[in-house]
Image: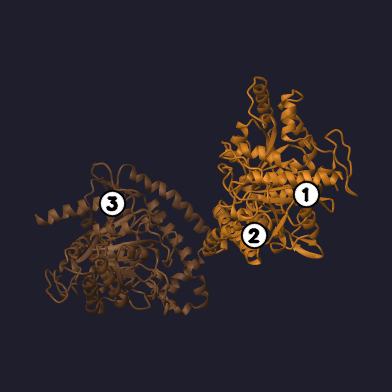
Chain colours: A orange, B brown
Amino acid sequence: MWCGPAVQRGAVGAGTGVMCRKGSMPIPQGPFTGRTVTDLARELRDRKTTSVDLVEQALGAVAVLDPALNAFVTVDAGGALEAARRADEELSGGADRGPLHGLPVAVKDMIMVAGVPATMGSRHFAGYVPDADAACVTALREAGAVVVGKTTTHEFAYGPTGDRSATGPSRNPWDPERMSGGSSGGSGAAVAAGMVPLALGTDTGGSVRIPAAVCGIAGFKPAYDAIPADGVFPLSTTLDHVGVLAGTPDDCLIAYRHLAGDGGGPGREGTEPVRVAWLDPGAVFDGDPRVTRTVRAASGASAEVRLSEEVAAELRETYLAIQSCETAAVHAERLERAPELFDAEVLERLRAAAELPGWRYVRALEARRRLAGTVGALFERHDVLALPAVPIVAPPVGAREMEVDGRSVAVRPALLALTSPWNVLGFPALTVPAGTVDGLPVGLQFVCRRGDEPLLFEAAARADAARTARTAD
Amino acid sequence: MWCGPAVQRGAVGAGTGVMCRKGSMPIPQGPFTGRTVTDLARELRDRKTTSVDLVEQALGAVAVLDPALNAFVTVDAGGALEAARRADEELSGGADRGPLHGLPVAVKDMIMVAGVPATMGSRHFAGYVPDADAACVTALREAGAVVVGKTTTHEFAYGPTGDRSATGPSRNPWDPERMSGGSSGGSGAAVAAGMVPLALGTDTGGSVRIPAAVCGIAGFKPAYDAIPADGVFPLSTTLDHVGVLAGTPDDCLIAYRHLAGDGGGPGREGTEPVRVAWLDPGAVFDGDPRVTRTVRAASGASAEVRLSEEVAAELRETYLAIQSCETAAVHAERLERAPELFDAEVLERLRAAAELPGWRYVRALEARRRLAGTVGALFERHDVLALPAVPIVAPPVGAREMEVDGRSVAVRPALLALTSPWNVLGFPALTVPAGTVDGLPVGLQFVCRRGDEPLLFEAAARADAARTARTAD
């Protein structure tokens, strides 16, 4: 067992564990634990550090921590150091690209980085090297960020468990015997362990928010298509979102503003306090009541709303039908020609997905339009909905059933239950750390309508301030 | 056998057949043969007729002609005469709603007319009476038109042959042993026989243009969604178009301007002659070379373009995948609960459609976007494409194979081959009479991009003027 980053205050080389979970093994934290993008940007401009120094810290942390976590598939030390030197030259020359300038970042292995292998977590893409950056990588580079490497993904991002990949499962820094979630499990582990301050992920049913929640960091899935997906390998084209993982919601917001096609939209106007309603997760999924209680206490919600069980079921079925048909469309030729190259579980799921009749997909597209109205109506009286990101704590690596509150729960549906509705509807959703259950982190998820993103981050900041105040009591 | 309307100059009660096809039986023509909307509007305003008189002419023609043609499912004599009296009062009172004011029209039985049964050609809807007008019926009524009845449709509009309906096949006025096409076969027969001057149809793969072509009249399928489809029973929601059938393209245009949500768009500006290119139908379907020659001679085309066989095949497969999945989605519960109420052939086709895997539908939606670019590029150098509407003449009622140029041809794919691509792409398409082959009419189809509708009608007018000049030589 391994003591999680949120309760560790050491750094690589320091190695002092504090307040570790009972029975856990204290391990060193990475160099970026507890340092925000704003902190790092200030250090750089105060000449207390350089981009080369930050990248070397990241590379060193990867060397020390990654053997146990398997967060990285590929590390591009040469490319990163060269980019860091250019960033340092630009900053010294007075050419300042903003808060990400010179910062090391990691990129999920579903997202193309020119000249760096992209495996999609699959043997199908062994040896594949794209020759162009994805649009989101271009945006990060234009903001001055330095790509240090590619992070582990569930094979083809087709799984929220993060433990079926050609290069092995990524593992949770809070307990490497547990999942770091998926499919962006490597990005979650890399940020949570402090190896990098920021990482890109993709989120089709929760693949940014699930790793962020179970690894105790922040993760933001913007509105559908707010960050262009060009150069990102598809999982399910109308559900796929590019998102960001970082230590704090503010860091997610800073990155998002550089990544969004429209610069992240307008800031909030007016001074009315944000109206947060608790969305009772019970109708959607019967999860761990301790997770629900912990998250609700952190939410800052002043009202409560529910989805009917019919709407919850329709959201679930709509997600499954859309994802199955779109994913099978991506992989039909691979399924036909080289099924043996898929992971066995992924193959079984793809084959079932390829059988789903088309009329169910048509119905799902109709249901999505209808549900957008039904669920959207909740926002007439509330700005932001709050609910757990994941209704259970991180399951053990490889587990597909797990005991929760004395019941056996199927892991995959549990992980996806509270995140996937917001992919179906394309609504912005943010998860932030909300405490621990059994010494493992749980995530508080905020959801808003497109255009209300500033309210989402305001709700997160208020919840964090309240939690900090309570902790200080 | 029965002599077709385009070579008949008699009227009901006159009964003189002229230039009849060899071996055919001369029959009387309906009262609206050879009378355009503009003619009728003038007669009304010159007090030479009244709306009540026109409606009585229509009802009389239906009584005499329809037993042999089966164009009508329901005739609403009472409602029509009442509406005609109101139209006459309005016109006498100086309230002029424009050229359609007081004219009798027929409406396909897939389109709701308040208080009048709508069967969709199916036993599933025996006894069903909608309580509201479809949007297109509301628009016609606002233009002053008088609905005289509902016309025969292939069951649920699911077939271009028009010969599988709960109330029997509609028949071709040129030869009642032949199809009047489908699925708007009743509207085609009603206009072609001169029972009404104008009818509404729906067109999902050619269901307005196929009956118009094989019945020797004009039929216009506008751009996708240009006429709102509210209150129209769906066949395939992203392919369904409301369209109009009339004696001349000008009459279609007059009706379209009243039906289109935006009033039919702007008129054409500039005086450059319309550039018409012949689209070689050979790559798309190997039809009757006499049809191709006859239509091409009438086209007025000054250039020639081709689709590759790959593009043609992709258009065909895209149409079939989209239509199958969307149609199965409309009928899934009926298929499950009361399959015995469907016509046997329709049932067999629906069951096959319900099996098509969803990933093929996803691929078809992607292909549609790609094809819109590929085919749309043809319009960079040409305003309008010309090709046959249907590559064969009207097949016998019930035929599914037919000899064409010494080969056996499958009837359903032949009927749909040249019309369905424009449903996939949503482009406006108009068919106009282009002469006869074996004494049966053939249709010349013009296609343009959305927004270029005035050019489509200009091309039709020029082709007609050229044909008239040739005939006069």
Labels 3 & 1 near each other (Cβ < 8 A) = no
Residue at mark 2: chain: A
Outermost residue, left side: B473
Residue at mark 1: chain: A
Circle on res. A434:
1
Outermost residue, top side: A93
Image coordinates of residue B68 in percent, x first then y, are: 25, 78
Name the quadrant containing residue B409: bottom left
Could you tell me the amino acid type at mark 2? Answer: Glu
In screen coordinates, is B323 left or right of B46?
right
| Residue sitting nearer the eye, A3 or B453 | B453
| Residue sitting nearer the eye, B428 or B409 | B428
In screen coordinates, is B215 left or right of A125?
left
Image coordinates of residue B216 in percent, x first then y, are: 23, 64
Report crowding for label 2: few under 14, some 14 to 19, many 20 or more residues within 10 A (C-alpha): few
Could you tell me the amino acid type at mark 3? Answer: Leu
Whether residue A423 is visible to the viewer of this picture, yes or no, is yes
Q: Which residue is label 2 attached to? A: A348
Q: Is residue A155 above or below residue A30?
A: below
Q: Could you confirm whether marks 3 and 1 are on the same chain?
A: no
Of circles 2 and 3, the one toward us is: 3
Circle on res. B66:
none
What whole-number distance in Å separates the C-alpha atoms at marks 3 and 1? 63 Å
Which residue appears at 77% of the width and 24% of the height? Answer: A48
Q: Which residue is label 3 attached to? A: B456
Q: Is residue B339 above or below residue A88?
A: below
In screen coordinates, is B295 left or right of A214?
left
Whether residue A186 is visible to the viewer of this picture, yes or no, is no
Callout 1 secondary element:
strand
Could you tell me the amino acid type at mark 1? Answer: Ala
What whole-number distance in Å separates the C-alpha atoms at marks 2 and 3? 52 Å
